[in-house]
Image (tube, rainbow, N blue to C red):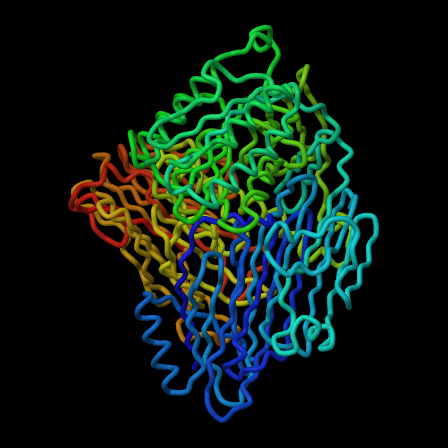
């Protein structure tokens, strides 16, 4: 028997290497040998899927503990973790943190194979594994991320630090870019994470590295021998980062639109060759007492570089703040002439660190940025930017984050705010919120020897705006569930990405782009043919198995992040649901006043979000992926990430007074009827019928069950009872008369106040009374794997009309909402 449990502590983090991290640390002192270590990484149109596979052997007569630790990219999510022992695949079971630790310790004392997963540092997946005597185990971790284009290229960084010599160490990277790979570079192993360690120019690639490249495909293989590994250390082997940089050809100004994969599309927009628009930038610099010493010195060094990089047509100003706010030029921003830049450098050199009034500084910046120069009054446009650097939290003046956010949005209006959090004490959640709500982004600046390079490196990313007010449009009757498509700015060397879903029977997708450049407005249009996946070409042969899921997963990735952004801005408890993949047809909708609590993302272990996982469902390994979900909670810094083969319905309970969600499982039996809602006052009841699915894999004793029928009975209309029976194929209404709706096409049934609607996305809305509405989702699998079957999901989309006497597994009682997830 094997026990695996996990507890994580994640905080927001953006890696200043700007790359894609995989780091492996195996405990050499535990006397467990790493026999095999493999890093397969596949990139298809910027979407990267990385797997870390390690086989370990305990040659001793007693059980020994080993440690498996993997660094993750800041924007990645984990999509698979499994352990294989004696050809059997084991998945973890969700437990409360203390319970998980206790189970692990008990199993460890008995000499059983057991694992406890936790985090030691931010963005690190850590597994303490107890390996049985003379046994071998293999564990596999898979995570996914969309690579971001910065400074004109994508960078993949795989940190290989096994902590011992490995006889079979392989790193395999494939890159498929259908528009072509414009350049590809493999850098020498990077031995530190400092930006100052970045190798520039041509240098030797790591030994035992093979590179094969065609126009749109690249294969890179790194297989260091024991001799190669001993160059770094005779005992611990390689301790460095394998770095690959590349960029793509993008000749069409409107970008690369890929419309395939069973009704999903992705649009990459990264125009080249446009003239640079001048900017109107204000630098807000924290000079509070905590900046004394190295921080203020590094900030001053970075500002010297940044000021030198200002273009003559740019306008700028500098505001320093502590308990008071000081403005370098009190009236407005001024032109970046050589004389003004020199004066600004002199001002910066005399800055001394002196609490922290962030609100007052932002209000002053808003006032200055709104003061137009004579050129701007004559019609010349400049991109307004505010760059805020602070190492603390607001301690003077307005200190409420909510109030600061309100004031900032009002003061800055359409100005983009970029927040830089210097060190661990900075209020990064506040900076992130301020930036997200004001057309910008937030980054961490780490207290290290290269902090000045981190600061100037970030400025380089926003130094060259090419477009503003960019709108990417698609005909409304062709697409739906489209992610963010309106962008305030486009900066040179970056990329804008939109994903969405395409209506059935659409042959061509009409795409338009509008935006404003240096001296004119730009409008582009194109018709993109929808491609059959079997005929699609993505450069590398053998990628078609990944192709059907690629854009689908990318859309889900963006949808999750967008819902998280909306959730943070509106302070709502949102969650997102994925019954494995494919993603469900549900998405947030304007049908209700607030976004639906969608629940259950595909293992959504996003390292840059606060989330808590109490349980997972129907997790079983197939083709390198498992299916589960996470609960996304507000203001929580820990979660339990667990994998299980339990497929029974899961229920999400939201406790509004504490702001917490609790997930629990019902281990039902086939043909059980679960009473989900019973409101005797309103005359509403909901039941769900369970159907079992029998797996071909022995993962645990519990047989997963799903809802295959939902029955809603309502007596609220004064004319007898209505019974609505919903299956995967039909909706049957029985009462005074009978009626039938199909679930595979839109339609509506209305009887008095009762309204049943199948919308264009084939979601079923059942409104039985004022403020009482249910949402039923149809989950279909084209290629179901173990523990998967087509099933129904039900949600309360409006529950305000239920009485205080309502009860059941779904329902309302004493203002506590119970919502069902699968």
> Looking at the figure, which quarter contains the C terminus?
bottom left
Relative to the observer, which residue lies in front, 63 or 801?
Answer: 63
Q: Position of residue 417 (x, y in %)?
A: 48, 30
Residue drawn at x 41%, y 35% is: 287
Q: Is residue 721 left or right of residue 407?
A: left
Q: Position of residue 626 (x, y in %)?
A: 52, 62
How many numbered badges does the structure rendering display? Answer: 0
Residue drawn at x 59%, y 61% is: 22
In this view, the residue farthest toward the right is 214
Relative to the observer, which residue lies in front, 373 or 300?
Answer: 300
Q: Position of residue 71 (x, y in %)?
A: 53, 60
> Looking at the figure, which quarter contains the N terminus?
bottom left
Is residue 732 among the parts visible in the rendering? no
Tell me the quarter of the picture where residue 228 sits. Answer: bottom right
107 vs 778: above or below: below
455 vs 130: above or below: above
134 vs 666: above or below: below
Tell me the quarter of the picture where residue 186 sits. Answer: bottom right
524 vs 447: above or below: above
Relative to the observer, which residue lies in front, 408 or 557?
Answer: 408
Relative to the observer, which residue lies in front, 596 or 467?
Answer: 467
Is residue 76 among the parts visible in the rendering? yes
Residue drawn at x 54%, y 43% is: 558
Residue drawn at x 63%, y 72% is: 37
Q: Is residue 318 left or right of residue 512?
A: left
Q: Is residue 285 left or right of residue 485?
A: left
Q: Position of residue 705 (x, y in %)?
A: 41, 63
């Amino acid at each position: 028997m094997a026990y695996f449990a996990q507890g994580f502590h994640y905080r927001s983090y953006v890696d200043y290497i700007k790359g894609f991290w995989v780091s492996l640390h195996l405990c050499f002192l535990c006397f467990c040998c790493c026999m095999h270590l493999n890093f397969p990484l596949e990139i298809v149109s910027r979407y990267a899927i990385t797997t870390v596979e390690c086989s370990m052997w305990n040659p001793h007569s007693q059980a020994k503990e080993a440690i498996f630790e993997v660094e993750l990219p800041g924007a990645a999510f984990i999509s698979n973790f499994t352990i294989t022992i004696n050809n059997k695949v084991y998945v973890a079971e969700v437990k409360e943190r203390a319970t998980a630790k206790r189970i692990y310790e008990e199993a460890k004392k008995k000499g059983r194979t057991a694992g406890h997963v936790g985090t030691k540092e931010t963005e690190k997946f850590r597994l303490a594994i107890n390996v049985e005597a003379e046994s071998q185990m293999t564990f596999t971790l898979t995570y996914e991320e969309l690579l971001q284009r910065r400074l004109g290229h994508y960078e993949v960084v795989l940190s290989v630090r096994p902590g011992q010599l490995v006889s079979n160490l392989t790193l395999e990277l494939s890159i498929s870019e259908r528009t072509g790979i414009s350049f590809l570079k493999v850098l020498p192993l990077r031995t530190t994470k400092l930006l100052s360690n970045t190798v520039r120019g041509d240098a030797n690639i790591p030994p035992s590295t093979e590179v094969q490249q065609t126009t749109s495909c690249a294969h890179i293989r790194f297989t260091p021998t024991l001799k190669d590994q001993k160059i770094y250390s005779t005992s611990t082997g390689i301790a460095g980062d394998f770095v690959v940089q590349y960029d793509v050809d993008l000749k069409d100004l409107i970008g690369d639109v890929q419309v395939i994969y069973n009704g999903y599309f992705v649009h990459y927009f990264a125009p080249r060759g446009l003239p640079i628009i001048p900017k109107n930038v204000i630098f807000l610099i924290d000079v509070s007492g905590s900046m004394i010493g190295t921080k203020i010195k590094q900030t001053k060094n970075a500002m010297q570089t940044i000021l030198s990089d200002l273009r003559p047509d740019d306008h700028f100003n500098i505001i320093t703040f502590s308990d008071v706010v000081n403005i370098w030029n009190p009236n407005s921003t001024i032109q970046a002439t050589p004389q003004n830049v020199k004066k600004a450098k002199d001002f910066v050199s005399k800055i001394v660190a002196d609490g922290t009034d962030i609100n007052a500084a932002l209000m002053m910046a808003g006032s200055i940025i709104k003061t137009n120069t004579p050129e701007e009054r004559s019609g010349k446009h400049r991109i307004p930017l505010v760059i805020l650097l602070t190492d603390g939290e607001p301690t003077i003046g307005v200190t409420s984050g909510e109030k600061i956010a309100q004031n900032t949005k009002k003061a800055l209006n359409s100005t983009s705010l970029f927040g830089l959090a210097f060190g661990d004490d900075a209020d990064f959640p506040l900076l992130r919120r301020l930036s997200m709500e004001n057309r910008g982004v937030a980054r961490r600046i780490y207290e290290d020897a290269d902090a000045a390079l981190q600061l100037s490196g970030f400025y380089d990313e926003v130094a060259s705006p090419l477009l503003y007010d960019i709108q990417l449009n698609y005909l409304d009757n062709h697409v739906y569930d489209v992610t963010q498509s309106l962008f305030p700015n486009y900066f040179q060397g970056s990329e804008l990405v939109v994903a969405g879903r395409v209506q059935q029977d659409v042959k061509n997708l009409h795409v338009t782009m509008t935006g404003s450049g240096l001296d004119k407005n730009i409008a582009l249009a194109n018709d993109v043919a929808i491609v059959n996946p079997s005929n699609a070409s993505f450069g590398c042969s053998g990628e078609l198995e990944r192709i059907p899921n690629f854009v689908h997963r990318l859309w889900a990735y963006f949808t999750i992040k967008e819902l998280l952004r909306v959730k943070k801005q509106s302070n709502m408890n949102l969650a997102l649901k994925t019954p494995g993949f494919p993603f469900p047809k549900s998405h947030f909708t304007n049908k209700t006043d607030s976004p639906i609590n969608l629940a259950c993302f595909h293992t959504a272990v996003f390292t840059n979000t606060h989330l808590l996982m109490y349980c997972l469902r129907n997790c079983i390994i197939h083709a390198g992926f498992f299916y589960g979900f996470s609960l996304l909670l507000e203001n929580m810094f820990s979660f339990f990430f667990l994998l299980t083969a339990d497929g029974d319905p899961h229920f999400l309970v939201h406790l509004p007074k504490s702001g917490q969600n609790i997930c629990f499982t019902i281990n039902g039996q086939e043909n059980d009827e679960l009473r989900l809602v019973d409101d005797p006052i309103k005359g509403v009841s909901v039941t769900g019928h369970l159907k079992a699915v029998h797996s071909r894999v022995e993962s645990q004793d519990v047989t997963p069950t799903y809802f295959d029928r939902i029955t809603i009975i309502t007596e609220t209309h004064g004319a007898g009872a209505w019974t609505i029976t919903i299956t995967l194929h039909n909706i049957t209404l029985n009462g005074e008369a009978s009626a039938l709706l199909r679930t595979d096409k839109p339609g509506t049934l209305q009887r008095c106040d009762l309204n049943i609607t199948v919308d264009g996305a084939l979601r079923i809305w059942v409104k039985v009374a004022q403020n009482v509405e249910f949402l039923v989702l149809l989950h279909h699998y084209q290629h179901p794997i173990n523990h998967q079957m087509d099933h129904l999901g039900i949600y309360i989309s409006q529950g305000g009309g239920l009485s205080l006497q309502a009860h059941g597994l779904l329902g309302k009682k004493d203002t506590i909402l119970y919502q069902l997830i699968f």
